[in-house]
Image (cartoon, grey):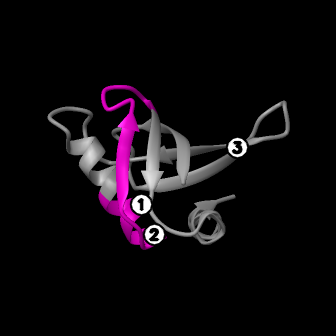
Amino acid sequence: MQLYVRITPRSKKFRITLVKLPDGSEEVRINITEEPEKGKGNAELVKQLSRITCGNVMIIRGATSRKKLLEIDGDEQQILEAIRKAACH
């Protein structure tokens, strides 16, 4: 499945937040602890999301941007449920 996420680097801890948008959809926002340089932030994002979703995670678009398009291997419903469980509300 493909998933758009918004990243905030240099946070105190790794955290996933789901934010309701005015159109009724949800945006996945992820705080990462690493700096956004030399791929450190992207590596943390891929590692943590792979652990949470139990699937292979690849960055398809946005490797140098805060908005990223990810490809996550696995069942879409299971992936979304895992992200919701890991999210801080």
The C terminus sits in image quarter: bottom right
Dividing the picture into quadrants, the one containing residue 66 is: top left
Quickly name the residue at label 2: 52
Residue located beneath label 3 in the image: 19
Q: Are marks 2 and 1 in contact (CB under 8 Å)?
A: yes
Tell me the residue that label 1 is attached to: 49
Q: In this rendering, which labeled residue sits more in front, label 1 or label 3?
A: 1
- Residue drawn 61% across and 63% down? 76
Q: Secondary structure at mark 3?
A: strand
> Image point 36% across, 63% down: which residue?
56
State how far apart marks 2 and 1 are (Cα).
5 Å
Q: Which mark is residue 71?
A: none
- Is residue 61 rendered magenta in the image? yes
Amino acid type shown at disc 3: Val
Is residue 87 on the magenta stretch?
no
Crowding at mark 2 (Cα within 10 Å: few <14, some 14-19, many 20+): some
**Disc 1, disc 3: CB below 8 Å?**
no
Q: Secondary structure at mark 1?
A: helix
Depth check: 46 or 30 in front? 46
Q: Residues within 10 Å of mark 3 (few under 14, many from 20)?
A: few
Asked if residue 42 lies left or right of residue 61, the reply is: left
Determine the secondary structure under disc 2: helix
Pick whichever of labels 3 and 2 is earlier in the sequence: 3
In the depicted view, which residue is nearer to us: 53 or 86? 53
x then y, percent, for residue 7: 45, 38
Which region shows up in magenta? 47-67
